[in-house]
Amino acid sequence: MGEARDDPRIFLVEPDQRGIIPLDGFHVPTRLRRTVRADGVTVRVDTAFDAVLDACAASGPGREESWINAPIRRLYIELNARGQAHSIECWRDETLVGGLYGVTLGGAFFGESMFSRERDASKIALVHLVARLRRGGWRLLDTQFLTGHLSQFGAIEIPRIAYLKRLQTARPLRPNMRSLFEPMTGSEALFYALQPTIQAS
């Protein structure tokens, strides 16, 4: 992480309690289910990674500063070029209205940041991310920290040692990367995100 947007330094954070969203315990509030099912936005993957990254770093109400500084931005863009970082994007017509991005390593996906320019856009992106991860065989969704925003989706905190065990199990896995990119309707996203068990395709 960076201390601030204009600070060139990078430091590592390893919290004692790690935030995760258990992929078999994902929750979607009722109103959001209707929104996702309506397919009011188009969900795309990796068509505007730089724009998602910049939107996550931009100032906004209640978020004047950002931990995404220039060195971190360069590193994530390089990871995207290598196929290890991905963006889930919500588009209304041809306008980017929300999304998220993260890094994949084996069967673990590390959610880094999200943004919304329209109500529920980042939440829709999260539902689609979870659906794609479950469909493809990922086993760990790391959120780093637990926030009130994420807790509504079933996010929890677990001790570092328990987290490291889950990471050790997930890292050797080879999920189906195509699952991230294949088109998916809102109804399909809810189906995959909320099924009790999903077999990797």
Image: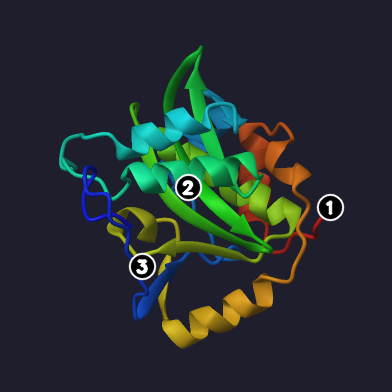
Determine whether 192 is above or below 60 in the image. below
Residue placed most toward the observer, 53 or 70: 70
| Picture coordinates of residue 85, whole percent (x, y) | 57, 47
Q: Which residue is label 3 attached to?
A: 12
Determine whether 21 is above or below 46 in the image. below
Disc nearer the start of the sequence (2/1): 2
Type of colouring: rainbow
Q: Which residue is label 2 attached to?
A: 75
Q: Amino acid at mark 1?
A: Ser
How far separated are the C-alphas under marks 3 and 2?
Answer: 14 Å
Q: Residues within 10 Å of mark 3 (few under 14, many from 20)?
A: few
Labels 1 & 3 near each other (Cβ < 8 A): no
| Picture coordinates of residue 146, whole percent (x, y) | 34, 65
Instruction: Decide if residue 79 is on the left or right side of residue 175.
Output: left
Identify the image quadrant of residue 156: bottom left
Q: How many marks?
A: 3
Q: Amino acid at mark 3?
A: Leu
| Picture coordinates of residue 149, whole percent (x, y) | 32, 53
Quadrant that contains the N terminus:
bottom left
- Secondary structure at badge 3 equals loop
Q: Nearer the viewer, mark 2 or mark 1?
A: 2
How far separated are the C-alphas under marks 1 and 3?
Answer: 35 Å
Determine whether 187 is above or below 162 in the image. above
Residue at horizontal 74 percent and vertical 48 percent from the top: 177
Determine whether 122 is above or below 137 in the image. above
Residue at horizontal 70 percent and vertical 37 percent from the top: 181
Q: Which residue is label 1 attached to?
A: 201
